[in-house]
Amino acid sequence: MAEIRCFIAVEVDDSDLIREISKIQQALLSSGAKLKLVEPQNLHFTLHFLGNIIDERIPELTNIIEQVKGAVFEVELNGVGCFRPQRPRVIWSGTTTGADQLIHHQKFLGRELRIQGFPSEKRSYSPHLTVLRVRSGLHREELMQMVQQYANKEFGKFLVKAIKLKKSILTPKGPIYEDLAVKELEGADDFL
């Protein structure tokens, strides 16, 4: 039995928003800290990280994704922050508008995943978009000063039109993501 590394997510696919995120990524890279950018095509809000799943269970996961109900909704990205500023590992952007819907979908999926025997998330869910990963403590103070500088930055909005089950292939150059299942939200056809 083969295993597939999987997660359930909402992708950021708005080119203007991605351009704004890219500007902040470049600015934070100038801190001198050792950072790894999240590639534009990989920007997403994780709803559930599933880890390695035997491929025979992918139809079950697809069925769970298909049960998601709800309409297209707007998410506004604002602010830059990190978890554990004394030892940051992830630099993210948060959201206020759209956070309730992301949390709702995350809870629904979590309940359905538990019913089917999939592992539960250990931490409480905090909707965030990872933009950079911190590789070492080098120039941490400079990095944290820049993160503070962009703490209230408004990036813009995008429409969430689908929830996706993603396959993650880890490579030395970074992960490659592939759609395994896509659940379009109600009204998505109006925006395609």
Image (cartoon, helix red, strand yellow):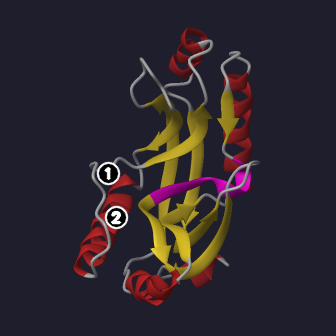
10 Å neighbourhood of mark 1: few (<14), some, or many (≥20)?
A: some
Residue that carries the numbered disc 2 in the rendered image? 106
Residue at the image position 59 percent from the left and 45 percent from the top: 156
**Toward the viewer: 85 or 54?**
54
- x, y percentage for residue 115? 23, 80
Q: Is 114 or 24 nearer to us in this picture? A: 114
From the image, tell me which residue sits under label 1. 125
Q: In the image, what residue occupies the spot 38% across and 80% down? A: 68
Residue 168 in picture, x, y percent from top left: 61, 64
The type of residue carrying mark 2 is Gln
Q: Amino acid at mark 1?
A: Tyr
- Please name the residue shown 39% across and 26% down the image: 84
Residue 134 rendering spot, x and y as whole percentages: 58, 30
Q: Quadrant of residue 107?
A: bottom left
Q: Is residue 155 left or right of residue 39?
A: left
Q: Is residue 162 visible?
A: no
> Would you place residue 18 above or below residue 22 in this image?
below
Q: Which residues are magenta?
A: 39-46
Q: Tally the numbered discs.
A: 2
> Pointer 2: residues within 10 angstroms few (<14), some, or many (20+)?
some
Look at the image and tell me whether residue 122 can be seen: yes
Quadrant housing the C terminus: bottom right
Residue at horizontal 61%, vertical 58%? 12
Q: Are marks 2 and 1 in contact (CB under 8 Å)?
A: yes
